[in-house]
Amino acid sequence: MKIAVHTTPHLHKLNYAPQWICALKQKNVSVLECDFHSNGILQKIRQCSGALWHFFHTPFDKISAHKILTAIEYCMKVPVFPNFSSRWHFDEKTAQHYLLSSIEAPYIPSWIFWNKSDALAFLDSCEFPLVFKLSVGAGSANIIKLDTKKQTEKIIDTMFDKHLFPYSFNEFAHPAYSPSKSGIKRFVKRITGALNYLCRNEYPPLNNYYIPERNYVYFQQYLPDNTHDIRITVIGNRAFGFIRRNRPDDFRASGSGLVDHNPKHIPLEVVQAAHDISLKLGFQSMAYDFLKSPGGTFLINEISYAYKSETVEQCPGYWDRSLRWHDGHIKPEDAHIADFIAQIEQGRLQ
Ligand SMILES: Nc1ncnc2c1ncn2[C@@H]1O[C@H](COP(=O)(O)OP(=O)(O)O)[C@@H](O)[C@H]1O
Ligand SMILES: [Mg+2]
């Protein structure tokens, strides 16, 4: 058996590929390490029994990976990780909204508006606070609480009449000018960019890694009094759990780095809910983030096929689908590979 794994010379340190390759070699599976962006990639993958690509929540990865993986999986019928079910909504909260609503999952009451008049009309009947989110992003970067109608109107204006760059507001906002060497260089570039636009009608370089977000707004009901969120990561028949405490004096947990791996702090109903959805939708790997509603039920905030593997490995064990506890640390990448190989072997028997 030969499996293709997407690799490049400068992989991000959190990329699953190195550990996937170790796990495959340990199972005596031959590995084709290649850049899935390269020319002729489909001919190479056609010779393989499967293909794995840990693509990230960056515009470049998301634009290319969906197209290439879909050709491999859907047209060439070669099994891939992440499969379509696990990946089509990755790092897109708006897509997750439709996914979670369609299966009537326990999901935080949320609203998406694709035009300005509908969004403004909503403000006549909604209750504040609301949580505004960009569809993309992680680590709480693109999340704000809106306490008033006026604040919300401003966001709606921005999203429909202008745009918002991810990682450009909250504590991530950059000052227009800073007196450092790179700050001055950036400022001069802004001036030349502005002059070129004024005199030559040439748009300034966006000078930003991210793509501007616009023409939608996504709101969630604010769930008060959550001191943490609960992350359940389901890989096959294994559910790992930990909680993430909020930053000090902040309602946001994601990205705080304040993780508690004590399994006693995980309510089993969320483990069950996560297992049920993963089984129902055929997710190979899925992290579910839960928050508690004022009524006491746990509701899903968002989901993601990819996550920081080290934090999952630090869990002291996992619950299977019968909610039986299994002791021991497991590298998520090893679990991905064990399940992926089993899936390919089962396919062969059919
Ligand atoms: N509707 C909500 N009510 C209360 N807190 C929320 C709500 N949505 C998000 N949060 C808090 O904000 C954090 C970041 O939001 P999240 O949607 O997970 O964004 P990210 O994709 O950046 O992780 C969450 O970890 C949670 O603590
Ligand atoms: Mg989150």
Image (cartoon, rainbow, N blue to C red):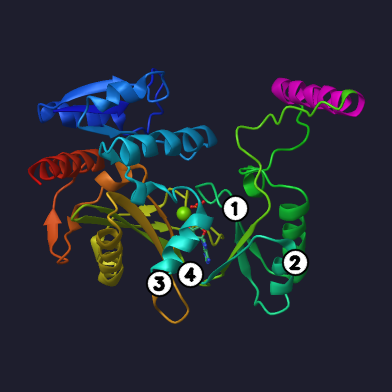
Kindly state the secondary structure of the residue where label 2 is placed. Answer: helix
Kindly state the secondary structure of the residue where label 4 is placed. Answer: loop
- Residue that mark 2 sits on: 117
Can residue 329 be seen here?
yes
Q: Is residue 67 left or right of residue 152?
A: left
- Residue that mark 3 sits on: 104
Which of pointers 1 and 2 lies earlier in the amino acid sequence?
Answer: 2
- Residue that mark 4 sits on: 108
Residues under labels 4 and 3: Cα distance? 11 Å
- Residue that mark 1 sits on: 134
Q: Identify the residue at horizontal 66%, vertical 42% (top origin).
A: 212
Foreground of the two, 332 or 110:
110
Whether pointer 1 and pointer 4 mark residues with C-beta atoms closer than 8 Å, the reply is no
Q: Is residue 193 magenta?
A: yes
Which of pointers 2 and 4 lies earlier in the amino acid sequence?
Answer: 4
Q: Is residue 245 left or right of residue 123?
A: left
Which of pointers 3 and 2 lies earlier in the amino acid sequence?
Answer: 3
Is the CB atom of the residue marked by disc 4 within 8 angstroms of ligand 1's nearest atom? yes
Residues under labels 3 and 2: Cα distance? 27 Å
